[in-house]
Amino acid sequence: MFMSMSEDGGHLMKGLTCMRLKHFHLCLTFMHKLFIVFENDDFAIINKPAGMVVHPTDDGRHMSGTLINALLGHFGKEGLSDMGGELRPGIVHRLDADTSGLMIVAKNNDAHVDLVEIFKNRAIEKKYIALVAGHIDPEEGRIESPLERARKNPGKMHIANEGEGKEAITLYEVIDYLELENQKFTLLLVDILTGRTHQIRVHFNAIGYPVAGDVVYGNKKINALVEKHGLKRQYLHAAELKFTYNGELIHKKSPLPKDLEGLLSKLNID
């Protein structure tokens, strides 16, 4: 295995690492950039690129090309917490594959426990930049609707009936009202108080403002428009993390990736 520095500042990992799993023994190949925004003895903050799955699945899918592959290549198995299980070393929380941005990775079990408690107590700010179809009104709002897995399609989430599902709370504020080829869009700053699977995407779709480029919950016409202008994934970026750890304020930001910035440059302020 070797590590080199890429032109854009990421650690380029290339090589082979193996994990012995309960039901099978597979080697995980990797050649991925790992962008470390912050690191101390207990955790690291990673800037995950879009298109990268966070971890392999229990049934053996995504055994290469994941964030876990890159983490194992950089930190080694002993340099990550093991409380998330064999396939999720270091993973405290997740981002969807096609969502870019900041993630926290635990480097030991004590830190993992502390970080989970921070998330559980909502003592962390997690802010996203999202582009949704339509001009959302009001300019600031709170979406509070429980989520659950769709019974007919467990890979999807939907709004649960009252008294069912898991609590999910999303706050937003408008950054700009925009337009592209007579289609209205809104650029949003989104803060999630809970971290449910697909939460932002489901919540905004449920109120009639789907995330641009979202092929699962979004609008096909809107998706075709933004793809025509170069966007090949959902317009969602985990842009900011802010929390206190052992008395130290940790506040990190991630600028928009080139693909999101590129589409934004083509939109007109409405």
Image (cartoon, rainbow, N blue to C red):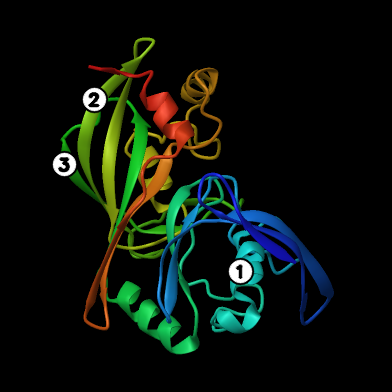
Indicate the amino acid at tag 3: Glu
Question: Does residue 17 appear to the left or right of 260 in the view shown?
Answer: right
Query: Residue 177 bears which disc, if any?
Result: 2
Q: Looking at the image, is mark 1 or mark 2 earlier in the sequence?
A: 1
Q: Nearer the viewer, residue 12 or 178?
A: 12
- Residue occupying the point 77% across, 82% down: 22
Residue 89 image offset from top left, x and y in percent: 59, 76
The front one of 227 and 17 is 17
**Which dot, 1 or 3, sits closer to the camera?**
1
Residue at 66% across, 68% down: 73
Q: Where is residue 43 in the image (x, y as percent from the top left)?
A: 43, 75
* Neighbours of disc 3 within 10 Å: few (<14), some (14-19), many (20+): some
Residue 154 lies in quadrant = bottom right
Q: In this view, does 120 lie above or below 56?
A: below
Q: What residue type is labelled 2?
A: Tyr
Could you tell me if the residues under marks 3 and 2 are in contact, i.e. CB atoms within 8 Å? no
Q: Which mark is residue 74?
A: 1
- Relative to 98, does residue 70 appear above or below in the rendering? below
Q: Which amino acid does label 1 sit on?
A: His
Q: How many marks?
A: 3
Residue located beneath label 3 in the image? 140
From this viewpoint, which residue is outermost toward the bottom?
A: 110
Q: Are marks 1 and 3 in contact (CB under 8 Å)?
A: no
Q: Which of marks 1 and 3 is nearer the N terminus?
A: 1
